[in-house]
Image (tube, rainbow, N blue to C red):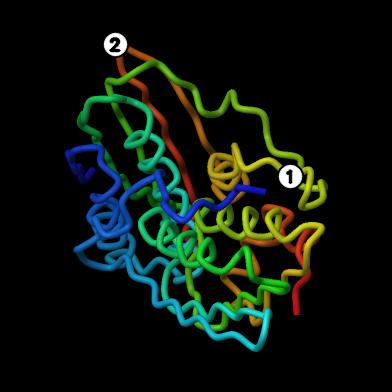
Amino acid sequence: MKELVIEAERKNLPKVQAFIDEQLEAVGCPVRTQTAIDIAVEELFVNIASYAYLPEIGIAVVQVTVHEEPLSVEITFIDHGKQYDPLAMEDPDTTLSVKERKKGGLGIFMVKKSMDNVTYEYKDGKNILTITKKLN
Amino acid sequence: MGLFSKKNSDTNPSANPTTSSSLKIKVTNDGAAYTFLLDGRLDTLTSPGLEGKVGEVIDDAGKLIFDLEKLDYISSAGLRVLLGAAQAMDGKGEMVVRNLSQDVRDIFDLTGFSLMFNIE
């Protein structure tokens, strides 16, 4: 398991994505899968940076574990900010017209749709969100 | 509609000095038709810059064209800017999105944006 501990600020997004990409490239992750994972990582890290510690700045921990058979990656985001389950958010209605469409909830919806598994738990004062994606 | 203000209070677009996150935006116009050629990544850090540039022309625009041929990454932050632009144009003009790469097309399909937008 590899771990990155970083201040949860939007400007640190490239560093978080570079850390993830390094692990993915080391195991030969296909480019398309890597892009999907990068987007999920952005949505989840930016959520923490935007809301978890508002108005303070806190720490985010990002852990990456690669599993064999099937080859997959598990990425966990941990913060000790406000308790918040992003999975409880209602999915946006993707059939609405431009006029009716709301801007909220898109990011976490993309994570749910593009990853193989997404779990959330609140434990010991920490928000723990884990995504899993097969590398094929 | 006031969806775009000239100043963006969301975040500071210039606070982005580092590494891989970059977007080049080329704006051209033919009368009231404005084309935005996007090159790079439309993410949390680069979206405010695009939002600002759209905001500068939205009052004068009768048509907005987003050319995504060179865009290889879009997150929800980018989608929200495009949706905001479309909503600002709704009832006063048209908006077109063209030349989607496969990666961006995947995201549009996933989020229903393929159905919602006029795509060329």
Depth check, mark 2 against mark 1: the one in front is 1
**Residue wearing tag 1:** A101
x then y, percent, for residue A110:
58, 47
In 3D space, how far apart are the residues under numbered discs 2 and 1 (Cα atoms)? 37 Å
Q: Chain of mark 2?
A: A
Name the side, left or right, on which A94 lies relative to A15: right
Q: Amino acid at mark 2?
A: Asp
Name the side, left or right, on which B102 lies relative to B23: right
- Pointer 2 and pointer 1 on the same chain: yes
**Camera-side residue: B87 or A16?**
B87
Task: In the rendered view, tell whether residue B101 sits above or below residue B57.
Answer: below
Residue located 57% across and 77% down the image: B68
Residue located 76% across and 40% down the image: A93
Task: In the rendered view, tell whether residue A98 sits above or below residue A63.
Answer: below
Q: Residues within 10 Å of mark 1 (few under 14, many from 20)?
A: some
Sooner in the amino-acid sequence: mark 2 or mark 1: 1
Q: The residue tagged with tag 1: helix, strand or loop?
A: loop
Q: The residue tagged with tag 2: helix, strand or loop?
A: loop
Q: Residues within 10 Å of mark 2 (few under 14, many from 20)?
A: few
The C terminus of chain B: image quadrant: bottom right
Residue located 37% across and 26% down the image: A128
**Camera-side residue: B102 or A2?**
B102
Give the tally of numbered discs.
2
Task: In the rendered view, tell whether residue B46 sits above or below residue B4.
Answer: below
x then y, percent, for residue A127:
36, 22
Q: Amino acid at mark 1?
A: Arg
x then y, percent, for residue B70:
50, 82
**Residue wearing tag 2:** A124
**Camera-side residue: A15 or A10?**
A10
Name the side, left or right, on which B62 lies relative to B11: right
Q: Chain of mark 1?
A: A
